[in-house]
Amino acid sequence: MSLKGMVCTIPYFIILAAALLHVHVQSETSLDDGFISIDCGLPSGSSYLDEKTGFNYTSDDGYINTGENHNISAEYNANELLRSSLNLRSFPNGGRNCYTLSPATASYKYLVRATFVHGNYNGNGRDLIRSPLAFDVYMGLHFWDRISITSMTEIYSAEAIVVAEVGFVSVCLIGIGSGTPFVSSMEMRPMKSSLYPAAMNNQSLALQERRSLGASNLVRYPDDPYDRLWWPSETTSGWLNISTTGAIKRYETDKIEVPIRVLQTAITLPTTSIPLNFSWAVPSGWPTTVQPQYFLNVHYTEYQKEQLRKFDIYYNSFLWDGDTPPISPAYLFADYKSAVSSFSDTSGFYNVCIVATNTSMLPPMISAYEIYYLIQHDDTATDPEDVQAMMNIKTDYQVGKNWMGDPCLPINYTWIGLTCRSDGVTSTIKALDMSHSDLQGAISSQFSLLKSLQYLNLSYNRLNGSVPDSLTNLLSLRVLDLSGNHLNGPIPESLCTSQSLTLRYDTTNGDLCNGKSPEKKNTLILVIVIAVTVVILALLACTLTLICFCKKQVPSVRPGCVDLPDPKNQEVLKGHVQTSDSREFTYMELAAITNNFTACIGEGGYGSVFHGQLKDGTQLAVKMHSSTSETGKGMAEFLAEAEMQLFRHWDGVTEHGLHLKLPKVWTTCTRDAYYQ
């Protein structure tokens, strides 16, 4: 029959002798197989080579930023314990604390394992029997196992086969109100993608039990290249241990690749009339909402060729795959019976019975079995690109806070500063506020991967450099706040000119948009328009004032001198107009300047115009108001006449009236009272 799956816990084991932990180590040096081996609670920056396993264990400080380091009690610091069990990290604060196991490659398959040894690290271990310590372990968002600690010396473990969705695998410990969660070690091993096909993107396989039958020692790396732990079988009455030294071959279609060393030992029975049985139960104390769904693998081979061996496998009294013929193991070939779908039973109890057929001359034999249960992924998840981007941002800026596990889910564990939006299936990051977070360095390009981001606040940090062009890919962005930083590079033009984006930044180091910002551009245009208008109005006012002054002003009478008009005279030099201050001359000075009025250069109705020259070479013209001028003509007419005479004599006039090409031209306006 087809099997329907379910979930279960990982059993715990007591290791009392060094022989149980004996493994074959390939060399004394560190192994480099892409394995991650973390000794939780090891001092920051520390590492060591475990001589028993051959693995180089490192501190967990680069994988988590919460928790407390502890050593187990000295009385349990025995040689038979794994070295990684001598210390641990506990989590007295916070509901969820997550390890980020990286690097990983998205869509690749990994074996992940956590171990837990209490060792009376807090002095309260003697109460464990009366009041067990319990906490949950999650694979990312999904329930993996509930660890129930009742012994100070047992090694409890949780193991799973997962497909990485992003560039890391997240393992979270969650308190349930029954004591402080802790962990002793974390390990992650890459696996071939063809192995364990039931482990897929939408579901993982958690190990409840894995046994190497007929063995006396634990089998792991390097006998198992994926470092699966094949534990020796517990003593069972009636089982006979058998073994072979023959070379066991594999079929090309092998999807599990059990280590040859595991297949070289097996158990059998003394007679064909006795069935071979093993069983398990759903762990007690699990959440009632979790219904385990199981996958079973049974491994076997044949050690002899002389006699026929055939058997059937019954699963909870049902013939397993009744449409297939009985199993007859091939001589020295690795083979197995594997569930193609999960199986569950409402009783919570599972039994496997292996029975020899009527034609079999030998009793059944098996070398190993594995019991897995599904870590079923629900339909909701955070967009993998958003998850990866946020984890990269966390790494770039070494962000602490509560940034662990999935950024958006569960809702009560959403990362501080994030606002997420869900369409019922996928959650995306809508807003990210990292203001006043003491961020240093350049603005990370990882922000550009948050495609649904509408609000990004990076204000009041210590960011420097320029704004990366990649931020222009955030088409949904409506607010970008960069104020309060030390940016000194340009901002991409499309961000500066975007009409849909509110962009905030400081101008301490200049305008980072270089005048490209619409708001600043409009302001600049307005300033220019106002300035031009003011200049034009000022010029018009000056011109009108000058005309009115020359026409209307009547100078006050000061005996003994010639009175110059109030408006300033101007000259054109190299295209620029210069203005000279008004000057006053006495009659004697004017006589000297004009050589006693001998150089007459013009004659008008109001008097003659005389040419003169100052001591510095400056030339000027003096029009003398004659006492015999036409009756009724006043000062305005006199000035107009003087202006006309100058215009007629020098055709180098650039503007009507007073602006001449002579180095300096002084127009002297006077009254006939001063010229006797």
Image (cartoon, grey):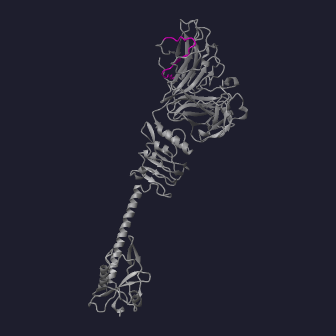
Q: In this view, does 513 lie above or below 549?
A: above
* Residue sticking out furthest to the left: 631
Q: Is residue 330 above or below residue 526?
A: above
Q: Nearer the viewer, residue 627 or 523?
A: 627
| Count of marks overlaid on the render | 0
Q: Which of 416 and 253 is in front in this view?
A: 253
Q: In this view, does 363 lie above or below 465?
A: above
Q: Is residue 380 left or right of residue 42?
A: left
Percent across and percent down for residue 241 are 64, 14
| Quarter the C terminus occupies | bottom left
Percent across and percent down for residue 469 are 45, 47
Q: What stretch is highlighted in magenta?
A: 325-346
Q: Is residue 141 left or right of residue 29?
A: left
Percent across and percent down for residue 141 are 51, 35
Could you tell me what secondary structure mostly forms the magenta stretch?
loop
Q: Tell me which corner region of the image, top left, top right, bottom left or bottom right, holds residue 592.
A: bottom left
Residue drawn at x 66%, y 23% as measured from the top left = 24
Percent across and percent down for residue 139 are 54, 33
Q: Nearer the viewer, residue 590 or 213?
A: 590
Task: Please say whether residue 667 is visible from this viewpoint.
Answer: no
Magenta-colored stretch includes residue 489: no
